[in-house]
Amino acid sequence: MAIAERTAGTVSPPSVSVRPGWAGWLSTTDHKRIGIMYLVSAFVFFLIGGIEALLMRIQLGVPDNTFLTPDVYNQMFTMHGTTMIFLGLMPLNVGLGNYMVPLMIGARDMAFPRLNALSIWLFIFGGLMLYVSFFVGGAPNVGWFAYAPLTQKQFAPTAGVDYWIIGIGLTGVASIAGALNFIVTILNMRAPGMTLNRMPLFVWMQLIVAFILIFAFPVLTVGTIQLLFDRHFGTRFFLPNLGGDAVLWQHLFWFFGHPEVYILILPTMGIISEVLPTFSRKPIFGYAFVAYSGVAIGFLGFLVWAHHMFAVGLGPLANAFFGAASFLIAVPTGVKIFNWLATMWQGSLHLTTSMLYAIGFISMFVIGGISGITLASPPINVQQTDSYYVVAHMHYVLFGGAIQGIFAGIFYWFPKMTGRMLNERLGKWQFWLMLVSFNLTFFPMHLSGNEGMPRRIYTYESEMGWNLWNLLSTIGSLLLAVAFLLFLWNVLTSIRRGSIAPADPWDGATLEWSVSSPPPVYNFAVTPRVRSRRPLWDEKYPHLHEVNGSHETPAARLRGLLYDGAEGEMPMAMEPIHLPSPTYAPLIVSVGIMILGFGIIYLGDFGVIAASAMLVGLLIMATGILSWVRISHVDSPYQAH
Amino acid sequence: MAGHGEEHSSHAYGEHSHSDRFYWLVAGVLAVVTALEVGLFIVNEQHLIAKWLEVTLLLILSTIKGAAVVMFFMHLKGDAGIFKFVFLVPLAFATTLLLSFMLLFSEHVGIAG
Amino acid sequence: MSESSMTRPQAAVAHHTSLGVDNRKLGVWAFIGSETLFFATLITTYFVFAPVNRARPDFQDPRQFLDIELTTVLASILLASSLTMVLALSASKRGDRRWFTTWLLATVGLGLAFIGGQVYEFNHLYHEGLTLSSSLFGTTFFVLTGFHGTHVAIGVIWLLSVFFKVRAYPDSPENAMDVEIAGLYWHFVDLVWVAIFVLVYLI
């Protein structure tokens, strides 16, 4: 048997001291609990970001509206963008990855469980710090890209930008720590036989995203640190009147910002690549192409950042290069789309809610991709830039694409995570309502954009001729809110009264379906052994094995560097299961870092008080690190037996 | 570096330690190269050779230094391929970043320039 | 393969891993990769502003401010600390507690000497009129070298905590790995200085 999991009863479950109630969550190091914490907190932030969008849509619903003041409107679009990207989409993907990646590769936990806990707390505190700004003089009002010199003290005198810097900084540290964790987990903790070329595609995409993260985020970190120094410590990086360079900020920001787009979309492409084969009852078409086109997208993503800056006037050479490189990205993306279509082709499609969302992803993402290709052309871009056409494009990619992909993943894996099925009928209602209202909201923006409506204006005059499009968008956005309420209702009722989920409700092919729903705390009683890309299908349908031919022919480009020692047969010893103990240390360290962050914000203005706060923060950090070291020594695999 | 396919292939990767005498030798080379760099810098204050040549020589010398630190002190030479991957790929990205930004800003000294 | 490996009781990896390498070591290498881009961005900023600095009325010439003798001493200190670090690792692997202690504390001492030298340098430059806000050179120089100094300080704390944790049994596999990954970080910080030394001080 390829999977030894059915014998769960023969191994005594490990003794894990999970603390009850809230304490259990605050001290957890279990990747599954941390994944759920990511999903729940990110969804709360996502709803807040949605409310901000609704407020903007209400303001723009009719011309010459006075529902929001210009300043509040600026705060809204800044916080909406920042929230959705850093506190919504990214952590939703991380949450699904945190829960599913160890299960899919046959591991018992992430490589660094305590670092994982640190990531979730830093993310939550970073998000909260960003929102504290509302209560201390106003949220940042400079756009999620925070263009210099608008962010300088004379133009943005409130502490909003400082909270933006520190909030992004904390979530950035969380992201880098999380990415390191994913890299080590995926590369080094796969079950025997799970070679890189047998990994589920969702795991592949998470691996690529983790690498993008650790390469791209430091650039943003440096940019924001320099901005902080500009605002408080007398430097002049982005101050043009003193020789600084506002364009440098744009370059630094987008050198991070464009890879960030792929950080948001690639994991959802991975979700689609799991959902489509499962509900088409067919293996993915062109596994290697899907995997390596992801690598290509990740790589090319670093070479196109200046297509966000065509309006700056970089010169014909730079424009030509960045335009051409941007067109090039359409190739691996197109490869993926045709692979997905070919996966469905002649499959026996099961139109579950998850599958509907996956198909919705493909169709909406194609529309967003096509408008993206038009924007990659510098002369067209100069016409469209900063207009609602761009808003339409990015929402088709990030909402029609990423959000629908995440819904596909949530409907797919909710039974695994909770042990209950989501209501399919409600889910389908939600899907159709969302699809229609999404298009009602964002399609008219193509038209208002083409008619010249600029982004980030808080109102417009009736004579501009944009009234109808804006009214449609606003109606659509209200309907979207209803769709999200349906989802919320679905989750809240299903989690208590939904039908009980079996271990393998969808007849899946990957390892997470081999364990109970929800999985035991140790995931696998016996480490599974993997012999193909679809271990469960091979076990359930042995007569179909090898029908689809030469799936063992890997595209071996990375082979030399990533050669996997687990290829061959491995004598498996029955190991005692050892799980990390719960600990508050990561939470304590995060609290210390947050206090340190508050101190940094006010260091320039209230020197002594802020410095003492920083000292307190450092002391709390040190306490946390001490208890961290102690517990990690106890838990060390070297000490285990 | 062979050594995959064994249960504890770490044996193959782990044993890259050189003798202490070798480390002293590397440090000696580093000292000599540093002396060469500083010497070149001081001597060329009289502009004996063209600036571009000096810069090229300095860059070559420090690349030697950096490579020695990475290969021998950090034991990257002979260590597992994955370590090379996670260090050399970002190093390539970093070099690209530096060069492309210098190119992008080469004719652009800002409005105050 | 040196004699040191003969006395090691166990492999460096406690459990089987897919790539046959230690999880923490892989994590630290990936972290170092990430840090490479952090410093590359700071250095890039320095280079982008170097010509602008020259073109401005408040131009401050790096060659006038930077003292090549002091810098050479600092660079030598860090290079020497890399030597003592690798010797400490070697001693820890063969279970030589006395030399392990000597070399590791020497590394810490050299690190502290570097920080002291940098504090002296910053203080000196400040009195010469070079500050964060005096010119673009001041802005870029202090942020770049300051962040490097911060990394050295963190490295010193890391080394000290490793020392107190492992000094009783520096040759156990877990402890040798503790020393090795702290050393990796330390060498990386040295490596950054190799780059800063040539790019900022010499060119």
Image (tube, coloured by chain):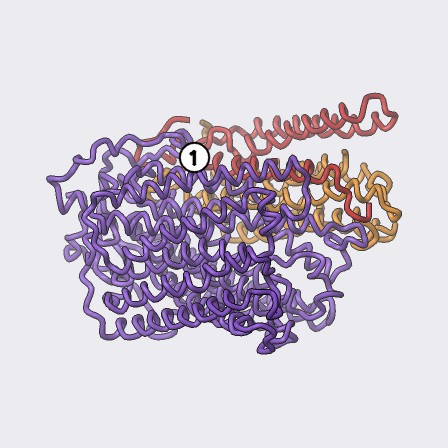
Chain colours: A purple, B red, C orange
Look at 75% across and 41% down and name the residue there.
Answer: B108
- Name of the residue lying farthest toward the top: B49
Residue A114 lies left or right of residue A455; in this view the side is: left
Residue A629 lies left or right of residue A308; in this view the side is: left
Q: Quadrant of the N terminus of chain A?
A: top left
Residue C202 seen? yes
Look at 49% across and 62% down and name the residue there.
Answer: A84
Quadrant housing residue A570: top left
> With respect to residue A454, does A553 lie above or below?
above
> With respect to residue A194, does A23 lie above or below?
below
Nearer the observer, A275 or A108: A275
Q: Please provide percent x and percent y for residue A470.
A: 51, 67
For label 1, the crowd category at 10 Å Cα-Cα, with few meaning under 14, some 14 to 19 and many 20 or more, is many
Nearer the observer, A179 or A426: A426
Nearer the observer, A481 or C68: A481
The residue wearing badge 1 is B14
Q: Amino acid at mark 1?
A: Gly
